[in-house]
Amino acid sequence: MIFEQVCAESPEMLPCLRLMCRRFDQIAAPLSYRRINLSANKLVASTGPFGQRNDILRNVHAHTRHVELRQLLDWDDVASLLAGCAQLDDLTWACGQEIFKCYFPEAIRRLAAEKWPKIRIFNEFTDYPGQGQSGNFLKTFPASNMISLTVHNRGFGQSVRPLYQFLTSCVNLETLRLFDLNDPSQPPNGRLPPVKCLLLQVRSWPYTPEEVHHLWNFSRLQDLEIPWHILGLMSQTMPPADFTHLHRLRTEHTWAGIDRPIEEYTQYHEMRTRFLTAILQEAPANQFRELDVKCHLPSFQISALSRHGRSLRILRLLDASGFEVDGSITPTTTTEDLAILQSTCPNLSEITLGINILSSKEILTFIDLLSRFRNITNTTLYMQKPPKIDLDHVPVTSDKILDLGQHLAKVLYEHKQGLHLSQVSINVGEWTGRKRAHRLVQANMKMDMSEAYQPRRLLNFSWDSQGIMTFEEATRAY
């Protein structure tokens, strides 16, 4: 049982355990070979000196269940090595990152068809359509064995119809990740497989409701990651009921401030936030496990979240306008909403929120509420600017933002109920906007621009099992 746990959590330790004694070697060897990353060195070793070769062949053939192929190899040699495997269950393919001609090797395809017809293939990278290729290279992959597929498009202007035709034949596909794809002018015949996990990085959603019905199948969708603007386009072609199986929803949105008239900006985010709320309300209660969104917080109904309180584990909830300093105040989670989350979401383990509380009394109330989340071990707080807190009793250095972050982290750690905190991250400071659009402001609005270009800082405070705190400042991020 202990070795199984080591294999699951720290597989890199298994070779060291094998060297400790013969008994450990006998236990750890099968686990070490259960999943292997087949490199050129390992392939050479398998044809090396007699004793070493026999040891490798014996363990690979008897114990290997999952093979990872991440670099160009002699595929005939690979097939010869794997041919003796008693049962190969899974194969990870990631060679497309090295070459543009990312065809699936015929020797491996033939071997899989003959010996392991039910092998599961996880394709981590496919360069579509590839340099000088059409999408026909996808036909070299055994479609019925595809479980996971990641596709990057680098050949803009070429039809992705062959890709969609290939996807319709991947009847056992569970995970699909599509990056930078042009949308087909006409959906192909047949629906895409009902995947469980879908990541879409597309520019548009140019479908009618009828086309969505004929092309996409969300009947098993549990995990969805899409751009925020695509969620809004989906709301015009799909009802919230199509997302009733979701467990996780993550929307990507880049903070750029208000770069349009305020009425248009508000309408844009309100519409998407209403659809988000409807999805949460349509799903069965206590189903969502993770929500990661930047929405229009003033129109977001916290009750839609609290109905998933017993299942929710990870929450990242921020306003779409961001934390730029340009004369506007960014909406954040209120103490009232935080109190509702604390009383209805007892199983949260990670939370990310914005905070715009400036007085010492209010911020300590907020910190006190956070400390009552008994199962939270990681929290991130976004602040538009440092609150004014009396730090007379705290050693003060020339870095006032660091002093503030360290003070808040210590208070939160010391007052935390239930599980101890392992990390507190504080994103604080003014927005760096030299190369990005500012919000639109009234011409007569007076602003203190001396702060407008101060960089944001991400301060990470963590604690070990002895309660000793360490600090690290991450690369500045927005």
Image (cartoon, helix red, strand yellow):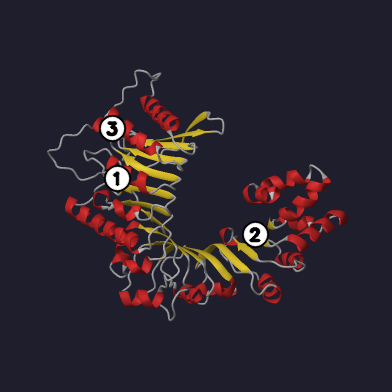
Amino acid found under the numbered disc labelled 1: Asp
Which mark, by number, is residue 362?
3
Callout 1 crowding tier (Cα within 10 Å): few <14, some 14–19, many ≥20: some
Callout 3 crowding tier (Cα within 10 Å): few <14, some 14–19, many ≥20: few
Q: Residue furthest bottom?
A: 189
* Nearer to the camera, 128 or 470: 470
| Image spot of residue 48 (x, y percent) | 83, 56
Distance between mark 1 and mark 2 Cα atoms? 46 Å
Element under label 2? strand
Is residue 456 at all visible to an observer of this figure? no
Is residue 366 rendered to the left or right of residue 112? left
Q: Earlier along the polypeptide chain: callout 1 or callout 2? A: 2
2 vs 3, front mark: 3
Look at the numbered discs 3 and 1 and tell me whether their residues touch, using CB distance below 8 Å: no
Q: Which residue is drawn at 39% across and 53% down?
A: 291
Q: Residue at x 46, y 43 (%)?
A: 375
Amino acid found under the numbered disc labelled 3: Glu
Callout 2 crowding tier (Cα within 10 Å): few <14, some 14–19, many ≥20: some
Q: Which residue lies under the disc numbered 2?
A: 68
| Image spot of residue 94 (x, y percent) | 59, 60
Look at the numbered discs 1 and 2 and tell me whether their residues touch, using CB distance below 8 Å: no
Q: Earlier along the polypeptide chain: callout 3 or callout 1? A: 1
Q: Which residue lies under the disc numbered 1?
A: 337
Distance between mark 2 and mark 3 Cα atoms? 53 Å
